[in-house]
Each structure stands twice: as structure tokens, then as C-alpha cells.
Amino acid sequence: MTHHDRPAWSPRTPPPGGRLAVPPDPGQESVWDYPRPPAVQPSTEHVLVLLGTTVVADTRRALRVLETSHPPTYYLPVADITDGALVAVAAPTTVCEFKGRATYADVVGRDEDGGRVVAPAGAWTYPEPSPGYQALIGHVAFYPGRMTLCTVDGEPVRPQPGAFYGGWCTHRVVGPFKGEASTRGW
């Protein structure tokens, strides 16, 4: 089936400002079909996080948080994170209107010479999430742009545009994404 043979697609929520959503190809998802408030979805994809040469996390038990206009954010179980790779920091904390108050951790790894590598506030968690998001308890999300490498099923992840956001861009997901140029009011 070619692109022209497929039924017409329109996004669940159209992007603001007259921008057009990219139609997903077979096997792809559009962030404009994701819900708001966000949904939490279990994933069996192989998720790997590296900082320096340290495997910080390796799991097939991630949770994907799917929210309109954002690529998925992967939350990994604490049990699948390397001991000592996370160091809690007192500040900052932030509040998500849906998930509640997030706390942050520095991510610690080693370089090829054994030297310490630190990604300040490179990970966050919701220790007491809002109702509906209790599945996130015991899970940690990582900013892919602050890590050396994050992969999903072997594919290197591109960080969501905008320094604040923690979405994971892969070939599976099409946008446009919040955080790109001219999306400030989204």
C-alpha cells in the first residue's frame, strides 16, 4: 500500500497556529493523536541509557507517557537502574499540572578513563504523583539530551527540542513537537 492508497488521516488534535501535523506512516504514531491529559502506557521495548561508558539503565519494563504535542517520555523502573547512578538533589522541584510534583537527581557515570561524569538534574521522578499517575511511583525519567546515549530497541534517541522537555524522539513518532521553533505558546 502506498502513501496515496491509505485512507485520509487527520490528527485527534490539530497543532495550533495553523501548523500541520505530519501524517504517520505505517508503524508510526503522531503526537497529535496522543491524549491530554497524558496517558501512561507499559512498553516492552528495549530501553538503554548510557552516561560516559556507564550503563545507567537497561530495561524492557519502561512506561511511556504520551501527551499531545510531545514525543513519549520513558520512565524506567528503579530496579533496572545501576546502583549509585542517581544522586538526589534538593532543588529544583517542578509541578506538572497532571502528574504532580517532580523531584530531580544528578546522573553519575564514568568516562573511558574511569573519571566521574555527572549530568546535573539529568533525571526526575514523581515520588507522590497525582491520582491517575500512581504507575509512575518507583520509575525515573531521563533527559536524553543530557545523557551520552539513549536507545529504544537499538535506535539512538534524539532529545525533544527545548531544554525543559524530556521527550524521546525516534523514527516511530512524528510531530511537529512542542519545543521546536515557534511553539512557545503550545
Image (cartoon, rainbow, N blue to C red):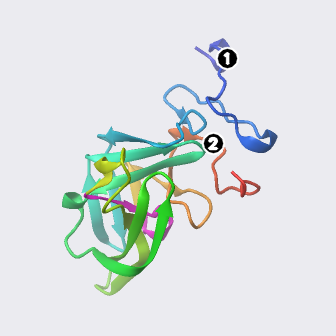
Residue at far front of view: 131
Q: Mark 1: which amino acid?
A: Ala
Residue 147's image quarter? bottom left
- 90 relative position to 20: left or right: left
The kind of secondary structure element at disc 1 is loop
Residue 51's image quarter? bottom left
- 67 relative position to 177: left or right: left
Tell me where residue 106 appears, x and y as whole percent: 37, 77
Relative to 68, does residue 156 appear above or below in the rendering? below
Viewer-side residue, 46 vs 29: 29
Disc marking residue 21: none
Tell me where residue 7 appears, x and y as whole percent: 63, 13
* Residue 153 appearing in the image: no
Viewer-side residue, 121 vs 144: 121
- 77 relative position to 129: left or right: left
Say which residue label 1 marks: 8
Disc marking residue 175: 2
Viewer-side residue, 117 vs 78: 78
